[in-house]
Image (cartoon, rainbow, N blue to C red):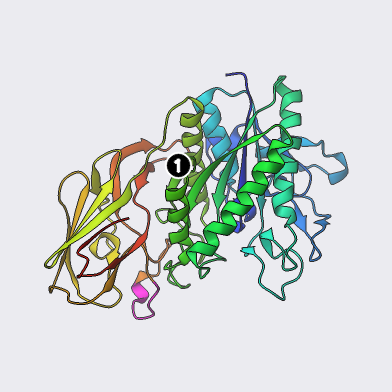
Amino acid sequence: MNKPLLIMTYGQSNADRHVTKPRLPSPLLEDLNVVTLTAGMGVRGCGYNDDGTRMDRKGEFTIDGRRVQPANLPPVLPAAYNETRGTSMLHVAGAMARTQTGAPVVGVRAAAKGGLRFVALPGREGIAGIYKLADGSISPILTLLAEEAAEIAAHLAEICGEAPSVVYILFVHGEADRSTPPGDYVREFNEARALITEGLAQRGLTPRWLITQAAGTSAAGDGNAWQSRLAVLDALSMDPDLVFVGPLYPYPLIDHVHYSSIGKALIGELSGLVIGLLERGHSWETPFLSHWRLDENIISIECATPEPLTFQQGLDHLDNYGFSIPVGPTIQRVTLDGPARLKIELDTIPDRKFFLDYAFRRTSRLHPEQVRNHCFAQGAVRTTWAHSSRAVDGEILRKWLPGFRLHIDPRTQSAVQ
């Protein structure tokens, strides 16, 4: 393959805006053919002032142990020279995609800023939304995504004689919109996507969206019973062109909400693997909830899955493999009933409505032993698919069931999701 690749992120701090230390000793993070713009903060994208204008802030680029002075920076440099003490998810994604496709060069860049909703709340000034500002105008984070994608594409064309026609956009968002109603979140996401598609089309580029589901917080935060996590599933069900990389709850955190260097490397590697498959004309399929049925005290959950389901063992902190009921009957046990069915046995036959959650819980101060370097509410349901990591020795990439909430009504007895 002689055509270069272009990968960007869109979202908030976990979309590679946050620098996580240390940099892992991985060959994928040494790939000099993954490049980024040096303007702004390199891989992390532009900085922004409160009034929405670009901040005159430069990222650190280091070559052979010496920092390159901002005045001497060329327009493009390898991502390996940028933020050399941190681990970049985009760098790993680009390197992995390159090994899968043979692309000569991969350009990467984040269009993101920490703590921002899609649309700013009233009374907020400046950069307060990744889609719209408080005054209703379009956020520069959105407009610069298209502008900088075209800029990187032009540099890639200079480097290898051909420009990419597709931009892979890794969507990593949801923490700031955790209480936004799913319908509003999906609408704002689709509106933002339409504007990005239009901006890219004007520059001869087409987006290919890779979607993730946020992990949530550690026990120090509020958990992950967030509406935005459900909204992502709604968006995926409405548009078959969206590619779901997977939920992010399996990956370790470094604080209450940001992924550790290992977490970022594994997310980036899985994303790069997916991009490589798509570039070679293959599909990427992960397990999803299909429908449920209640028979007396047994809930049967059917999944659409490309491989048989199984449980990840060794997650001793998890009760019932990640299933929980906040108010209602008690779960007695969770078992597999065939390659695509889960059985949840309750202690009683329910006679009123309740919620059945999977990897979807609020934190409880009653269980301090659950403080650990992962999100509070993980899940243990995955498929048998496995891929040994090249980014982190001993780690294995897998396909996980996303977190969800089921509204169980004994009068209905079953429902298609």
Q: Would you name the residue on which mark 1 appears?
A: 240
Residue 313: percent from left, percent from top: 25, 52
Highlighted range, magenta: 362-369
Residue 224 visible in the shown view:
yes
Left or right relative to 375: residue 300: left
Residue 57 lies in magenta, yes or no? no
Residue sitting nearer the eye, 391 or 355: 355
Residue 191: percent from left, percent from top: 61, 53
Principal secondary structure, stretch drawn in magenta: loop
Left or right relative to 357: residue 30: right
Residue 364 lies in magenta, yes or no? yes
Left or right relative to 22: residue 149: right
CA neighbours of label 1 inside 10 A, class few (<14), some (14 to 19), many (20+) = few
Question: What residue do we see at 45% from left, 67% from top?
Answer: 226
Q: Secondary structure at mark 1?
A: loop
Residue 389: percent from left, percent from top: 42, 38
Left or right relative to 375: residue 81: right
Question: What residue do we see at 45% from left, 42% from top?
Answer: 240
Residue sitting nearer the eye, 66 or 84: 84
The N terminus: image quadrant: top right
Most distant residue in the bottom direction? 366
Q: To which quarter of the image does residue 189 belong?
A: bottom right
Question: What residue do we see at 56% from left, 58% from top?
Answer: 187
Most distant residue in the front direction? 412
Residue 153: percent from left, percent from top: 71, 32
The C terminus: image quadrant: bottom left
Question: What residue do we see at 73% from left, 49% from top?
Answer: 143
Residue 16 visible in the shown view:
no
**Vertically, is 282 above or below 258?**
above
**Vertically, is 234 above or below 34?**
below
Q: Amino acid at mark 1?
A: Pro
